[in-house]
């Protein structure tokens, strides 16, 4: 803790010349954001360097002051990264910490960095840069997950399993097809990332406190320097906009929902009652008293952590909902939910990637399960339509009777004799048995986007191209 006098001096610097008293202890406590916003240090330094360079180019500060600022900022970055930086809570946030340290290193020239910039445009810029990298990281992790999904889908293009609606056995599908459904969801997540990156790529820097500045700044230069496409068009909007963070949380929430659905299926499928897949010991835990257990903890946590990400979205939406223009201190509450969502999404996507690569499928069990529950009943009805020219409604009725018979006899559809079927529909021929097999059923569903092994293989080729 610095001495009282120098503390007052530092706080005076932040609070301005018209302040003579120190803040109440509780104000200092509620006001500080250093505890979490130190994560923005690299973006803050990057933004400050761009701003200093622009000020010098525009002859607002001297080249000499500019190079002192740049080398001071580099030194600070090294101090932070080597653990040698003395973070001070009483300086509120990372921005003031860096500015104060710059003053210690280069003296009065540090104060010139404040010219034509406020913490309002500074923090909006830093945070946007951070969210932009977070989106790129999420995209990369999702690409990795998709790669694993494609590999497993290729392996299981012809693996038959029951497909469900209402979690009731519906029609046979292939495991490859089922996995590719998730590939599509993650593709949409990635396309939302792409869209959001385009929209958010405008620079708030140079909007100053809220109204712009009377200094002859060059906002195009700083925008370019920081990898933005252009400066934001309205300074009031620029300092009070957090749409970029909200979009990240919104698309992250949708992505978390996809991950959670996939996790749920892993949990169901790996329970012994289903027995479709097994996770190795790498992705399951045992129980201290029940030796038979293989708990799918990672999948459960991917499902469980979804709430945090939705929570982050609702939290920031609520923070923003009634704020008048422009900046309000409420907006300091924008960062923690985003940081939490980022860390959570990273864990969940990587855990899911790992589980997808890890599971083994029990093909026999899946096929057995598909053979129960009369999954080829639709094929039977379709056959009646195609071969006997019956209206579907009538075919559906006849099939219902055959299913009822199978139920009564406690046997599969293909175990009912032709004679018995003909008692229900006299024109049925032995050809019917072809469509009652699982293999034929999935093979026949070769419409675009359908479950046939051939369709799955084509979809994989297409997916690899895009
Ligand atoms: N720590 C603040 C934040 O994260 C920085 C902006 C402060 N601006 C202000 N006008 N007090 O939002």
Image (spheres, helix red, strand yellow):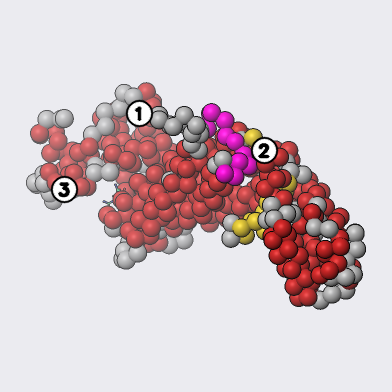
Q: Which mark is residue 80?
A: 1
**Earlier sequence position, callout 3 versus callout 1:** 3
Provide the residue span drawn in magenta.
273-283
The crowding category of the residue bearing disc 1, from other C-alpha atoms within 10 Å (few below 14, some 14 to 19, many at least 20), is some
Left or right? Give the position of 348 relative to 307: right
Left or right? Give the position of 258 relative to 118: right
Q: Nearer the viewer, mark 2 or mark 3?
A: 2
Q: Is mark 3 within 8 Å of ligand 1?
A: no
Left or right? Give the position of 112 relative to 341: left
The crowding category of the residue bearing disc 2, from other C-alpha atoms within 10 Å (few below 14, some 14 to 19, many at least 20), is some
Q: Nearer the viewer, mark 3 or mark 1?
A: 3
How far apart are labels 3 and 1 at the CA level? Answer: 26 Å
Q: Which mark is residue 362?
A: 2
Left or right? Give the position of 64 relative to 9: right
Q: Confirm or deny contact between disc 3 and disc 1 (CB under 8 A).
A: no
Work out whether residue 373 or residue 270 is closer to the camera in this orientation and state it: 373
Q: Confirm or deny contact between disc 2 and disc 3 (CB under 8 A).
A: no
Tell me the residue at 37%/38% (across/down): 39
Identify the secondary structure beneath mark 1: helix
The x and y percentages for residue 154 are 74, 40
Q: Which mark is residue 27?
A: 3
Q: Which mark is residue 389?
A: none
How far apart are labels 2 and 3 at the CA level? Answer: 61 Å
Question: Does the stretch in magenta take in 58?
Answer: no
- Residue 289 falls in which quadrant of the image? top left
Identify the secondary structure beneath mark 2: loop
Work out whether residue 387 or residue 64 is closer to the camera in this orientation and state it: 387
**Earlier sequence position, callout 2 versus callout 3:** 3
Q: Against 176, is 407 above or below?
A: below
Q: Is residue 178 visible?
A: yes
Question: Does the stretch in magenta take in 277?
Answer: yes
């Amino acid at each position: 803790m610095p001495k009282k006098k120098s503390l007052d001096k530092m706080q005076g610097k932040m609070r301005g010349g018209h302040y003579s008293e120190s803040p109440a202890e509780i104000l200092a406590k509620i006001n500080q954001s250093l505890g979490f916003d130190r994560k923005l240090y690299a973006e803050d330094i990057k933004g400050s360097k761009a701003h200093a360079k622009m000020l010098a180019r525009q002859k607002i500060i001297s080249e000499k002051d500019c190079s002192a600022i740049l080398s001071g900022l580099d030194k600070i970055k090294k101090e932070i990264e080597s653990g040698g930086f003395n973070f001070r809570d009483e300086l509120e946030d990372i921005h003031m910490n860096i500015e104060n340290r710059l003053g210690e290193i280069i003296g009065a020239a540090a104060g010139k960095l404040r010219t034509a910039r406020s913490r309002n445009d500074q923090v909006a810029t830093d945070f946007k840069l951070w969210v932009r990298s977070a989106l790129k990281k999420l995209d990369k992790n999702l690409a990795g997950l998709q790669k694993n999904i494609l590999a497993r889908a290729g392996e299981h293009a012809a693996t038959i399993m029951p497909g469900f609606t209402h979690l009731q056995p519906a029609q046979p599908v292939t495991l490859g097809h089922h996995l590719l459904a998730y590939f599509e969801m993650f593709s949409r997540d990635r396309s939302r990332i792409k869209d959001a990156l385009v929209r958010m790529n405008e620079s708030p820097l140079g909007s100053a406190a809220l109204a712009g500045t009377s200094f002859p700044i060059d906002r195009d230069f700083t925008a370019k320097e920081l990898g933005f496409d252009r400066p934001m068009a309205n300074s009031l909007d620029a300092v009070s906009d957090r749409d970029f963070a909200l979009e990240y949380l919104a698309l992250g929430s949708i992505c978390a929902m996809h991950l959670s659905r996939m996790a749920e299926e892993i949990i169901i499928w790996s329970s012994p009652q289903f027995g479709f897949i097994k996770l190795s010991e790498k992705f399951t835990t045992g129980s201290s008293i029940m030796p038979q257990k293989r708990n799918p903890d990672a999948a459960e946590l991917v499902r469980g952590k979804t709430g945090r990400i939705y929570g982050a979205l609702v939290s920031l939406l609520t923070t923003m909902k009634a704020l008048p223009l422009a900046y309000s201190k409420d907006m300091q509450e924008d960062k923690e939910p985003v940081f939490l969502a980022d860390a959570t999404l990273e864990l969940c996507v990587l855990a899911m990637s790992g589980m997808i690569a890890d599971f083994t499928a029990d093909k026999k069990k899946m096929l057995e399960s598909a053979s129960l529950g009369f999954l080829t009943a639709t094929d039977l009805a379709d056959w009646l339509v195609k071969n006997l020219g019956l209206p579907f409604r009538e075919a559906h009725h006849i099939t219902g009777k055959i299913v009822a018979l199978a139920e009564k006899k406690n046997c599969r559809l293909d175990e009912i004799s032709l004679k018995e079927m003909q008692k229900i529909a006299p024109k049925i021929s032995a050809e019917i048995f072809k469509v009652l097999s699982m293999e034929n059923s999935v093979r026949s569903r070769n419409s675009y986007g359908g479950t046939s092994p051939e369709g799955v293989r084509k979809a994989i080729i297409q997916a690899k191209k895009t």
